[in-house]
Image (cartoon, rainbow, N blue to C red):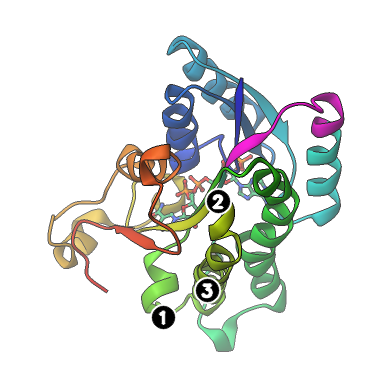
Amino acid sequence: MKFAVVTGGSRGIGKAICIEIAKMGYHVLINYRSNHDEAENTLNQIKEGGGSGELMKFDVSNPDEIKASLSSWKEKNPESVIEVLVNNAGIRKDALIMWMKDEDWKDVLNTNLDSFYYITKQLIQDMIVNRYGRVVNVVSLSGIKGLPGQTNYSAAKGGVIAASKALAQEVAKKNVTVNCVAPGFIKTDMTAELEEKDLKRMIPMSRFGNAEEVAHVVSFLASPNASYVTGEVISVNGGLYT
Ligand code: NAP
């Protein structure tokens, strides 16, 4: 059995990614922070589609929880290699910098950027030894272009993009690829309070995207078919050029 980890798999884009990656034949370790019922729901949808998976609860902003969860899974499954890692879990806490709380800067950096470091560092070792691996990081238009009111989120996502480009070069010879997917406006809980009818005027496709449209690009980058693509950022934003 082949294994994949998807962070933030209980809702939104992460849920759609879990379902797509399961269709590729992976047993999916579905990470979530607190929403157990929704994580169960993702697992049930995977099973209904004939796939398999399990839940893995940890807070991606907490390095101790990351280490404890991934190490204990490895101890119980010493022969199993995690081939695919999708760093998807993320939050935003928007404010103009002069009103931003220090806590909101730190939370957004810890959840979106530090998590990439701690989780990837732990899982990439097996990929290198195994001479095969796929790391896909869900970033954002905000991390490419910068968006006002999101200095914390833009810094975090931009940091993941730069780190991915560096890591891609570190591990390329080992047949491990590292890429990013940068969504624009996607209909999920994260964007629930945004007015699509106003914002869609800026988008050439005149609509928000859906989570499955992001998941299809992630699953391609996570597949053997993307064997010569690394260090790239693919935008999924309906033509909202940056
Ligand atoms: P969402 O609907 O708010 O879902 C967030 C997911 O991340 C949930 O599964 C949540 O788990 C999990 N999560 C949040 N903090 C976590 C933590 N500390 N530890 C573990 N899991 C955590 O968000 P989404 O819209 O699907 O966003 C997914 C990714 O896409 C994020 O990285 C986001 O920045 C990025 N993105 C989204 C959009 C958009 O328009 N939606 C645009 C660009 C980029 P619980 O259910 O347990 O809370």
> Most extreme residue toward the front, as rendered?
173
Q: Which residue is mark 2?
A: 176
Q: Dot 3 surroundings within 10 Å: few (below 14), some, or many (20 or more)?
A: some
Q: In the image, what residue type sits under mark 2?
A: Val
Question: On the image, numbered disc 1 is attached to which residue?
Answer: 148
Check the picture and name the quadrant holding the N terminus.
top right
Find residue 234 and name its label.
none
Question: Does any portion of residue 91 appear in the rendered image?
Answer: no
The residue sitting at 48% across, 25% down in the picture is 22
Name of the residue lying farthest toward the bottom: 98
Is 82 a magenta residue?
Answer: yes
- Secondary structure beneath dot 3 equals helix
Per the image, label 1 sits on a secondary structure element best described as loop
Q: Residues within 10 Å of mark 2 (few under 14, many from 20)?
A: many
Q: Amino acid at mark 3?
A: Ala
**Nearer to me, 6 or 110:** 6
User: Disc 1 marks which amino acid?
Assistant: Pro
- Disc 2/disc 1 C-alpha distance (Å): 35 Å
Q: Describe residue 224's horizontal placement relative to residue 120 as left or right.
A: left
Query: Dividing the picture into quarters, in which one does residue 39 lie?
Result: top right
Q: Residue at x 50, y 15 (%)?
A: 51
Mark 2 and mark 1 residues within 8 Å of each other at the beta carbon: no
Disc 3: which residue: 162
Would residue 127 be seen by someone viewing this image from the given angle? yes
Tag 1 and tag 3, C-beta contact below 8 Å: no
Q: Nearer the viewer, mark 1 or mark 3?
A: 3
Give the magenta-colored segment's residue range.
73-84
Q: Is mark 2 within 8 Å of ligand 1?
A: no
Upstream in sequence: badge 1 or badge 3: 1
Q: Earlier in the sequence, mark 3 or mark 2?
A: 3
Alpha-carbon span between mark 1 and mark 3: 20 Å
